[in-house]
């Protein structure tokens, strides 16, 4: 891994950097908060190790600035400020973990590994789009051209299924299995009926079709 260590105590920094390098990691070390912010903004690091009490710009401000700039590199605070309020403040500032000095190097190394592993997991999308259509899965809200579209639960599930597979044809069988959880064909027009209702809400009022029928194959949504 490539790590950025922001620590102005040269003794602690040398100890941490040496230990991490012995474990095979590349470590860049800076002592000034402003320099650290600029380096972290440039990206390329797997984990940031940040002291709170830094010259130039304190560690809390460094992490806050990174989060405001949408830099999501995991950050662990390594600091002598160990009160409950201090830890809460650090996590609320955007820190992903908090370790108080004095510390065991093995624990620091393990926490870094956990943060790096967590950040490498695939991120589940919470906002899906196609053209000017947007689906917010957290807010359970669908809009097109800025207008809210009210969908019934099954219509919402059908649209989500299509959006997650944007540009790919979805057969009737795929839709029955993915939206209705049916492993067999009930010989009804449930798919056709729901697609028609969905089009009436998502496409018809806006004069441009996003959901198309691929004759003899199925349905597709695309930009």
Image (cartoon, rainbow, N blue to C red):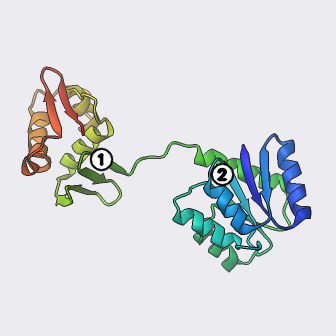
Q: Residue furthest right?
A: 11
Residue at 72% in and 63% down: 35
Residue 92 can be seen in this image: yes
Q: Nearer the viewer, mark 2 or mark 1?
A: 1
Residue beneath disc 2: 115
Figure check: 115 above or below 78: above
- Residue in front for this viewpoint, 119 or 161: 119
Assign a secondary structure to mark 2: helix
> Which of 107/91 is in front?
91
- Give the residue at mark 1: 129
Dot 1 falls on a residue whose secondary structure is: strand
The 10 Å Cα crowd at callout 1, few under 14, some 14 to 19, many 20 or more, is some
The percent coordinates of residue 146 (x first, y second) are: 21, 60
Name the N-terminal-most of marks 2 and 1: 2
| Residue 159 horizontal side relative to residue 87, left or right | left
Percent across and percent down for residue 181 are: 27, 36
Q: Residue at x 62, y 53 (%)?
A: 42
| Furthest-top residue in this view | 216
CA distance for labels 2 and 1 = 30 Å
Quadrant where the N terminus is found in the figure = top right
Decide if residue 20 is on the left or right side of residue 125.
right
Crowdedness near tag 2: few (<14), some (14–19) or many (≥20) residues, C-alpha within 10 Å: some
Picture coordinates of residue 56, whole percent (x, y): 73, 73
């Amino acid at each position: 891994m490539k790590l950025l260590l922001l620590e102005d105590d040269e003794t602690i920094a040398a100890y941490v950097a040496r230990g991490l390098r012995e474990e095979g990691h590349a470590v860049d070390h800076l002592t000034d908060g402003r320099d650290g912010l600029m380096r972290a903004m440039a990206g390329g690091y797997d984990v940031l190790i940040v002291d709170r009490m830094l010259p130039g710009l304190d560690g809390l401000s460094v992490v806050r600035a990174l989060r405001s700039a949408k830099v999501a590199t995991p950050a662990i605070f390594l600091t002598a400020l160990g009160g409950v309020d201090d830890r809460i403040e650090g996590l609320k500032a955007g820190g992903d973990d908090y370790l108080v000095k004095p510390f065991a190097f093995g624990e620091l190394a393990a926490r870094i590994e956990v943060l790096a592993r967590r950040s490498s997991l695939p991120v589940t999308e919470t906002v899906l789009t196609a053209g000017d259509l947007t689906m917010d899965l957290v807010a359970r809200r669908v809009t097109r051209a800025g207008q809210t579209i009210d969908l019934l639960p099954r219509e919402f599930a059908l649209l989500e299924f299509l959006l997650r597979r944007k540009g790919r044809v979805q057969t009737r069988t795929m839709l029955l299995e993915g939206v209705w959880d049916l492993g067999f064909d009930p010989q009804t027009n449930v798919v056709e009926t729901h697609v028609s209702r969905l089009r009436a809400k998502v496409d018809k009022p806006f004069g441009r079709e996003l959901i198309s029928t691929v004759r003899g194959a199925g349905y597709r949504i695309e930009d």
